[in-house]
Amino acid sequence: MDASPQEVTQLLQAWSGGEESALEKLVPLVYSELHRLARRYMAREQPGHTLQVTALVNEAYLRLVDSPHANWQNRAHFFAVCAQVMRRILVDRARSRSARKRGLGIPALELDEALVVAQGRSTDLVALDDALKDLAALDQRKGQIVELRFFGGLSVEETAEVLKVSKDTVMRDWKLAKSWLRRELNREESNGA
């Protein structure tokens, strides 16, 4: 089902206001986009991962529905939060696997060209998550931009809309954040090797 961003935003705001029927109308309208987002995440996972795309969508959906009503600004804000929830699910699973394996390592994932963090090398989701948390502690907006652009797949325009900043600010912070993350991940890789 195709829906306009305005229709999705109206349903999100109605749901935020406690209108349960809005959620029923919303789910079919956003499902394919959530599935695409989950596919993007899962493409970075090692083959044979125990969590499938549909299961990731369902788990993220359950976390969103079970949480207190969010004050959804718009469609972009909703998908940004969904991306963050999916990332948390995968990072939590990766940390759990790592703990069970007692340091045998976590499957590596290749970063796509959108974020050339460790060019030509692989990095793991936990290391990236840790570096992203460090970045957010130093500069929250830069951390949010990476979250929205890389993990959420939002455009520069959508990211600017969610954060209420200019497109130029998004681009400037995006470039600085990529450089910072590249340096941190390379440092961690050389320290761990």
Image (tube, grey):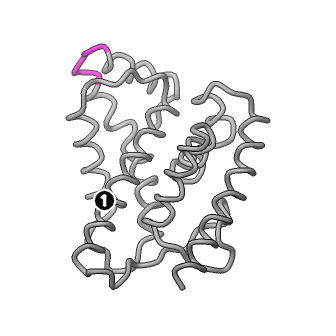
Residue 11 position (above or below residue 66): above
Residue beneath disc 1: 92
In this view, the residue in front, 136 or 79, is: 136
Q: Position of residue 172 (x, y in %)?
A: 77, 43
Q: Position of residue 85 (x, y in %)?
A: 36, 46
Which stretch did the figure color magenta?
17-22
Residue 96 position (above or below residue 57): below
Q: Is residue 60 left or right of residue 4?
A: left
**Residue at x-position 34% and y-position 25%:** 70
Q: Residue 98 appears in which quarter of the rendering?
A: bottom left
**Residue at x-position 36% and y-position 52%:** 88
User: Across the whole image, how many numbered discs are drawn on residues?
Assistant: 1
In this view, the residue in front, 148 or 191, is: 191
Q: Position of residue 143 (x, y in %)?
A: 57, 45
Q: Is residue 21 magenta?
A: yes
Q: Position of residue 120 (x, y in %)?
A: 67, 80
**Residue at x-position 48% and y-position 30%:** 75
Helix, strand or loop at mark 1: helix
In this view, the residue in front, 160 or 139, is: 139
